[in-house]
């Protein structure tokens, strides 16, 4: 070490670590800052670039520290080191409106604390609770409270915590790295809750400096700002123990599952356009869901995201509920309230891709860290987003931990996994030459497949009764079969084939439906190859597709009748159910996330009728075992007649485990069918449980006066038959008394 010329009377020594510190390039801050023994004496060195003077507490009195460099390096030397941690008094010369004194413990008096084992598991892709290690956490070291920060940035030369507490100056709080793991850590004492912060990262190759928000943060400031916030002590006291215990033994395969999919920002809004908070949703949404008879609410993505128009599907905060609707405690309050009312809550979760926003995951440390470098496997052309590098262990730890976080911390009852098809295929939505094959030359994304299996194994092992639902639109086999049998391990799969065929059929003018009867019958050829959910989701009522009502042919009366008929078909066909908000009362316009649903339409009799019909169907589905108990087994379904294409009528039985059954007859034309004979499996009195043409639903009220006797005449291979009046564009549900 050599001496430089004096600077304002201070001898400045040239030191590579000092030069790196001042240039914000110090890779190992604990090698230069903090306490150490040097030449047999104690040395404490601190860096406060905005301080006029710094004192250190030695044996209950403050001694002035020597300014070792004009840029703000201060040193104290003594015979021995004081007890750790040591207290400093700082005179801040840049405070406004005048210099001020404050006391603080030095961050570099606290050695790194994260265990080598956690770091090892993280690097191996097996740290499923990485959110408890990385991110920011309220902590106590040596009796001193503060915040422990940790982040993964393996290609960084230097990483610093920056925020208002250090004037966003990357020189002040450089972090320590754990060997070659890429995991950086720093404990900052005395930092108050709710402090804004980011990470300033210098790439080791290019020297580029990036300002990034914390990927593991639990809270962020409200968009368009994007800094993370340090934790606050939670206040929510869970009292849903009974729900969680019952869920663990819930026989979901044979239970009703009826999901109400909502977008929290547009279900309802205040008159001035403000969002409902999570707590306000609890007050208004839960009674509605109870009235309507849904078993679960599915929240479209509420993970933090910068762009309202993405509906949450371009996530930047994988461990944080969006601040648009309140705090994490507010969301916990909502979920707890749902559980107390017997309603499950699922989250739409997005592990397939993430946005290119510069403040977030994209090229996080100046390199392709969470994504692939090659755009042929790393860029979603349709959505302009990055594809996660599922083969990288630390990315796997990140995503598995995100799923674990939502289920563990928020007691969620399931994850609907978005865009699974795009994860499975390397050539998804790509032309020849625009994708790279796997190591065997195939189009399957082997790393993504392994990740999905690990995800599902984790969820089913650690969260009994929690469900995973795949949005998967291809013919990939065994999506909802256990991983140990070679399946992907999901609980259920969205039946996109049923949805597409059904809506395509319903769009046809009834005159031509006779030529498309196979669209109603083909689904039975594969209905039991997976555990299917029948989805009429948000994707079918946006981007110019029109509302469900708008898809229907005919005049206004026929359109509403068709919607009621569609719901009757959906709620009686094998498979669990999902419907999107607004469709429940046949909203006229397609969904727009920019404002609330058209609740005023419920002043109209026809809209009220659709709502009443779906409400009654929901309750019938939940209360009648034959309509849900054998959804996934062929024993629960039998055609009575699927060949009457000329009349566009289908009829079928749904059965329960005990042999009880209901008969469903659907007429897809506006022509009433009087004296229509149907074969039945047993003689007796049949009761009309439901008629979508009821006057209570806005229909023409053609029906069967509630009861029909069997005729004694075998029909359609059945031992008996009934003769019914089949209303126009309507369905009826009959049960044997």
Image: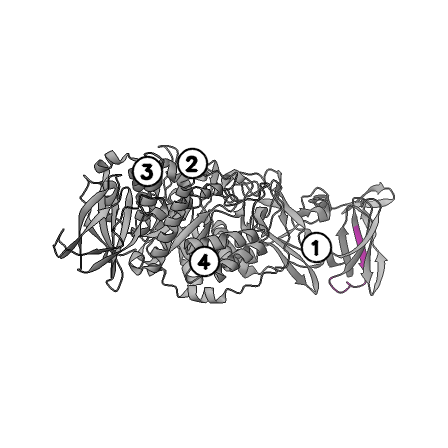
- Between disc 2 and disc 4, the foreground one is 4
Using the rendered view, name the quadrant where residue 149 is placed. bottom right
Using a 10 Å C-alpha cutoff, classify the residue at mark 2 as few (fewer than 14 neighbours), some (14 to 19) or many (20 or more): some
- Is residue 78 magenta-colored? yes
> For the residues marked 3 and 1, what is the alpha-carbon distance in whole angstroms?
64 Å
> For the residues marked 1 and 4, what is the alpha-carbon distance in whole angstroms?
39 Å
Q: Is residue 154 left or right of residue 638?
A: right
Pointer 1 and pointer 2: residues touching (CB < 8 Å)?
A: no
Q: Nearer the viewer, residue 1 or 657?
A: 657
Q: Is residue 482 left or right of residue 356?
A: left
> For the residues marked 2 and 4, what is the alpha-carbon distance in whole angstroms?
43 Å
Residue beneath disc 1: 191
> For the residues marked 4 and 3, what is the alpha-carbon distance in whole angstroms?
34 Å
Q: Nearer the viewer, residue 727 or 63?
A: 727
Residue beneath disc 2: 376
Q: Nearer the viewer, residue 534 or 653?
A: 653
Using the rendered view, name the quadrant where residue 192 is placed. bottom right
Residue beneath disc 3: 558
Compare marks 1 and 2 and give the one earlier in the sequence: 1
């Amino acid at each position: 070490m050599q001496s430089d010329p004096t600077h304002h009377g201070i001898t400045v020594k040239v030191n590579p670590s000092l030069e790196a510190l001042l240039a914000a390039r110090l890779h190992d801050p604990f090698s230069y800052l903090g306490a150490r023994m040097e030449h047999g004496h104690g040395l404490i060195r601190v860096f406060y670039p905005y301080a006029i003077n710094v004192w250190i507490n030695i044996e209950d009195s403050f001694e002035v520290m020597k300014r070792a460099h004009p840029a703000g390096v201060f040193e104290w030397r003594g015979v021995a080191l004081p007890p750790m941690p040591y207290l400093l008094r700082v005179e801040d010369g840049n405070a406004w409106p005048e210099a001020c004194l404050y006391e603080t413990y030095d961050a570099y008096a606290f050695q790194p604390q994260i265990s080598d084992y956690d770091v090892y598991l993280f690097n191996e892709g097996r740290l499923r609770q990485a959110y408890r290690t990385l991110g920011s956490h309220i902590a106590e070291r040596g009796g001193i409270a503060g915040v422990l920060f940790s982040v993964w940035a393996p290609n960084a030369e230097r990483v610093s915590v920056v925020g208002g507490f250090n004037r966003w100056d990357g020189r002040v709080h450089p972090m320590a790295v754990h060997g070659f793991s890429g995991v950086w850590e720093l404990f900052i004492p005395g930092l108050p809750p709710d402090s804004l912060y980011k990470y300033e990262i210098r790439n080791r190759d290019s020297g580029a400096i990036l300002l990034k928000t914390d990927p593991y943060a639990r809270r962020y400031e409200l968009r368009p700002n994007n800094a993370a916030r340090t934790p606050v002590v939670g206040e929510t006291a869970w009292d849903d123990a009974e729900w969680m215990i019952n869920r663990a033994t819930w026989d979901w395969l044979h239970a009703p599952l009826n999901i109400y999919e909502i977008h929290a920002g547009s279900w309802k809004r205040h008159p001035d356009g403000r969002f409902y908070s999570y707590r306000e949703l609890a007050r208004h949404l839960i009674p509605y869901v109870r009235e309507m008879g849904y078993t679960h609410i599915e929240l479209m993505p509420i993970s933090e995201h910068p762009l309202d128009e993405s509906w949450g599907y371009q996530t930047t905060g994988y461990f944080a509920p969006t601040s648009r609707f309140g705090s994490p405690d507010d969301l916990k309050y909502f979920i707890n309230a749902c559980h107390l009312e017997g309603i499950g809550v699922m989250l739409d979760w997005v592990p397939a891709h993430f946005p290119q926003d510069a403040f977030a995951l994209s090229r996080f440390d100046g390199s392709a860290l969470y994504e692939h470098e090659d755009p042929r496997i790393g860029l979603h052309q349709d959505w302009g987003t990055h594809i996660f590098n599922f083969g990288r262990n630390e990315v796997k730890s990140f995503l598995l931990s995100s799923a674990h976080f939502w289920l563990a911390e928020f007691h969620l009852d399931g994850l609907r996994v978005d865009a699974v098809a795009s994860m499975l295929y390397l050539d998804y939505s790509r032309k020849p030459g625009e994708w790279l094959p796997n190591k065997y030359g195939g189009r399957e994304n082997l790393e993504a497949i392994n990740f999905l299996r690990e995800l599902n194994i984790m969820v089913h092992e650690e969260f009994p009764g929690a469900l995973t639902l795949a949005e998967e639109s291809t013919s990939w086999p065994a999506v909802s079969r256990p991983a140990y049998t070679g399946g992907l391990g999901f609980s259920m799969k969205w039946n996109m084939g049923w949805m597409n065929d059904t809506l395509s059929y319903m769009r046809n003018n009834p005159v031509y439906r006779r030529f498309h009867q196979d669209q109603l019958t083909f689904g039975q050829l594969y209905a039991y190859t997976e555990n299917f959910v029948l989805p009429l989701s948000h994707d079918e009522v946006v981007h110019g597709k029109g509302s469900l009502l708008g898809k229907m042919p005919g005049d206004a009366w026929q359109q509403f009748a068709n919607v009621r008929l569609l719901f009757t078909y959906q709620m009686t066909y094998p498979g669990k159910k999902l419907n999107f908000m607004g469709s429940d009362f046949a909203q006229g316009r397609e969904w727009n996330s920019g404002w609330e649903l058209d609740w005023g339409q419920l002043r109209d009799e026809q809209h009220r009728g659709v709502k009443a019909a779906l409400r009654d169907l929901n309750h019938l589905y939940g209360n009648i075992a034959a309509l849900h108990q054998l959804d996934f087994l062929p024993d629960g379904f039998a055609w009575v007649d699927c060949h009457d294409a000329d009349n566009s009528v289908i009829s079928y039985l749904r059965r329960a485990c005990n042999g009880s059954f209901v008969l469903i007859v659907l007429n897809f034309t506006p022509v009433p069918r009087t004296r229509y004979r149907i074969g039945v499996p047993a003689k007796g009195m049949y009761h009309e449980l439901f008629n979508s043409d009821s006057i209570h639903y806005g229909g023409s009220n053609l029906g069967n006066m509630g009861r029909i006797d069997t005729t004694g005449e075998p029909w359609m291979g059945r031992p008996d038959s009934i003769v019914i009046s089949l209303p126009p564009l309507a369905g009826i549900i009959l049960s044997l008394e």
